[in-house]
């Protein structure tokens, strides 16, 4: 089994349109288990759409997407299984404001995994400790800072013990002083061997963590490679332009 | 006074604004006497307010007649003192004489204690349901038990209770039955219809919900009640004819469900898309997502319009008057057809208004309390 384990994520010539707008053009990629991929590109390049297709928050119209060997189709049962194994962290945290931090973390394990409540709470406390906010467990999301909320969101996803974690611009909505605490959490997750696909503009994070960086523009993958190669020896004009723009911004 | 405080605490930091900026005097100055015109309007309104309050108190309490003597010859009440006071004082004797008829309608006089217990049971049910610590699964059992007990008391026919046919029910119990059953059944229907209307994957269900909402919303409640009472029996096979109260009840349920559904839909639409996506991303199925994440938040958002609709329908149950069901308003109206009291309908309507007001105002106060509590627990 171990030898022929399918890749974590396989995209094969994926195409997607929003109405007339062609947002993903023949995107193909393979993410191996334990691999960390950073997707970057200018806004509107389709990188968020791409990552949202991987757990079918968006549906693609052409091509195939396989997650852990299972193809994404309209079969909702299979979809719920895939989703429970793929954790997602959003730009705007999307914690459930009517539930406490602890309840946010235990909800899916209890209702999807059928875990007993006590066990789910123990697991949740374990992950909240990992993201360094166990003392906030009984508060509501609205009482936490943005950085704390995003760390809770990461803990909430981890409580499902996912095989893959998707991050959709996890630090873009945060104040500068809170970005580091979230990135540190993600770095420690990467060090533990989690398979990660991260959409981000944090190039320092990409350098430190990514096995591979994918640069997207206008719905297609323009260039990809190791972070060192990508940042120090960009091949295409579009990537050169993008890098010069974000480096100026920092 | 402020100088005294500053000498005690030399730090130039004051925790309270000075009287002239905050206190009631400042409030009155800013809001009631801000300019000459504002002062004039304030004074004029105050004059009319006080004058009408004084004359109402005079009419209702000072010059009013509370009881009238019995005419020994006929054994009936003699409203002569009331007639004399007509125009200057209220005649509360009519309420004293008729309150049981107003509250219980034509329910047999000797059995009216049963209807009274029913009212108490309803009130107890409302109070218990209003308390958050009773919001558990057991509450459903309490409802079933209480409503069964209410049915048992109203109908009788067992445990030595005399059987009372539905035609003889009346007054406040009818109003409470129509509104409680109406809203209790309409609410779950409304949730399903609102969800159905927003369904993207089931176009047939969506169409059905839209048609249901638009058709019912397009006709007045009165015509729906007429249809239920007059037309519906024409289409039913002979012998299978549910009684008038049940038909009116179903009409009210179907009608209220539409309005509640639209209110709930508003809440569903107000929720950020991220909440749906986060629930999806965790692998929650549609129903789990809906009942654990979406509805708890959507319903909190629409507490004010929801309660508004509740209050509206509580009062709208009085429209069953036109199909001859003896609710609170009907029995009040019939009470003043008594030749002795014909001239004193104002007093009866004031009492009816007070009863309706007590229920509606409690609902309004309760919803405000609920809103505050939720906004405290889930600050954003």
Image (cartoon, helix red, strand yellow):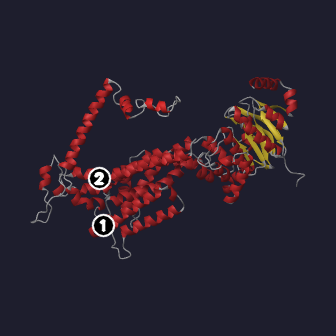
Instruction: Specify the quadrant that holds the N terminus of chain A.
Output: bottom right
How many neighbours does mark 2 have within 10 angstroms: few (below 14), some (14-19), or many (20 or more)?
A: some
Q: Quadrant of residue B56?
A: top left
- The residue under the point 67% across, 48% down is A135
Q: Determine whether the residue tagged by mark 1 lies in a helix, strand or loop.
A: helix
**Residue most extreme to the front:** B7
Q: Can residue A170 be spotted in the picture? A: yes
Whether callout 1 and callout 2 share a subunit is answered yes
Viewer-closest of A37 and A104: A104
What residue is pinned by disc 1? B112
Q: Quadrant of residue B108?
A: bottom left
What residue is pinned by disc 2? B352
Where residue A106 sits in the image (x, y, percent)? 67, 53
Q: Determine whether the residue tagged by mark 2 lies in a helix, strand or loop.
A: helix
- The residue under the point 66% across, 42% down is A149
Query: In the rendered view, does B348 fall on the left or right side of B152?
Result: left
**Residue most extreme to the bottom:** B160
Q: Is residue A142 above or below residue A240?
A: below
Q: Chain of mark 2?
A: B
How many neighbours does mark 1 have within 10 angstroms: few (below 14), some (14-19), or many (20 or more)?
A: some
Q: Can residue A215 be spotted in the picture? A: no
**Residue most extreme to the right:** A3
Task: Report the Cα–Cα distance between label 1 and label 2.
Answer: 19 Å
Query: In the rendered view, does B12 fall on the left or right side of A127?
Result: left
Where residue A122 sits in the image (x, y, percent)? 71, 56
């Amino acid at each position: 089994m171990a030898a022929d384990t399918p890749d974590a994520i396989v995209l094969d010539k994926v195409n997607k349109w929003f109405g007339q707008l062609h947002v993903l053009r023949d995107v193909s990629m393979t993410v191996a288990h334990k691999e960390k991929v950073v997707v970057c590109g200018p806004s509107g390049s389709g990188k968020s759409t791409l990552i949202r297709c991987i757990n079918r928050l968006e549906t693609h119209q052409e091509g195939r997407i396989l997650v852990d060997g299972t193809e994404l189709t309209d079969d909702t049962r299979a979809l719920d299984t895939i989703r429970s194994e793929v954790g997602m962290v959003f730009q705007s945290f999307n914690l459930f404001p009517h539930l406490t931090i602890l309840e946010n973390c235990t909800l899916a394990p209890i209702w999807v995994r059928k875990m007993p409540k006590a066990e789910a709470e123990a697991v949740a406390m374990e992950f909240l400790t990992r993201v360094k906010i166990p003392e906030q467990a009984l508060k509501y999301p609205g009482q936490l800072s943005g950085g704390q909320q995003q760390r809770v969101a990461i803990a909430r996803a981890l409580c499902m013990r996912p095989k893959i974690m998707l991050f959709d611009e996890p630090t873009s909505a945060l104040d500068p002083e809170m970005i580091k605490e979230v990135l540190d959490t993600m770095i420690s997750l990467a060090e533990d061997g989690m398979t990660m696909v991260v959409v981000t503009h944090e190039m320092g994070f990409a350098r430190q963590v990514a096995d591979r960086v994918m640069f997207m523009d206008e719905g297609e993958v323009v260039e990809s490679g190791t972070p060192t190669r990508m940042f120090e020896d960009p091949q295409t004009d579009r990537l050169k332009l993008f890098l010069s723009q974000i480096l100026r911004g920092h | 006074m402020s100088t005294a405080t500053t000498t005690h605490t030399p730090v130039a930091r004051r925790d309270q604004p000075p009287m002239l900026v905050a206190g009631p005097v400042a409030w009155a100055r800013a809001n009631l006497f801000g300019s000459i015109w504002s002062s004039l309007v304030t004074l004029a309104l105050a004059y009319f307010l006080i004058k009408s309050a004084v004359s109402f108190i005079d009419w209702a309490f000072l010059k009013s007649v509370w009881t009238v003597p019995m005419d020994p010859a006929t054994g009936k009440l003699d409203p002569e003192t009331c007639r004399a006071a007509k125009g200057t004082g209220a005649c509360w004797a009519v309420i004293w004489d008729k309150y049981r008829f107003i509250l219980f309608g034509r329910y047999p006089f000797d059995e009216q204690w049963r209807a009274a217990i029913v009212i108490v049971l309803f009130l107890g049910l409302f109070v218990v349901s209003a308390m958050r610590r009773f919001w558990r699964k057991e509450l459903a059992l309490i409802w079933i038990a209480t409503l069964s007990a209410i049915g048992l008391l109203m109908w009788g026919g067992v445990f030595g209770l005399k059987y009372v046919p539905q035609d003889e029910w009346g007054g406040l119990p009818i109003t409470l039955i129509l509104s409680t059953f109406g809203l209790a059944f309409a609410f779950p229907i409304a949730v399903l219809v609102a969800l159905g209307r927003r369904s993207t994957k089931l176009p047939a269900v969506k169409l059905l919900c839209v048609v249901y909402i638009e058709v019912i919303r397009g006709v007045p409640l009165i015509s729906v009640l007429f249809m239920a009472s007059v037309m519906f029996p024409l289409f039913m096979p002979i012998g299978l004819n549910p009684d008038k109260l049940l038909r009116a009840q179903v009409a009210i349920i179907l009608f209220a469900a539409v309005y509640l559904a639209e209110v709930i839909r508003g809440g569903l639409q107000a929720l950020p898309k991220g909440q749906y996506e986060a629930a999806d991303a965790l692998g929650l199925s549609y129903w789990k997502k809906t009942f654990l994440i979406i509805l708890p938040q959507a319903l909190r958002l629409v507490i004010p319009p929801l309660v508004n609709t509740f209050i509206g329908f509580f009062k709208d149950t009085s429209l069953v008057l036109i199909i001859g069901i003896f609710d609170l308003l009907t029995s009040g109206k019939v009470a003043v057809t008594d030749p002795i009291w014909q001239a004193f309908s104002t007093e009866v309507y004031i009492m009816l208004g007070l009863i309706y007001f007590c229920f509606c105002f409690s609902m309004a106060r309760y919803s405000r309390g609920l809103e505050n509590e939720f906004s405290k627990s889930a600050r954003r």
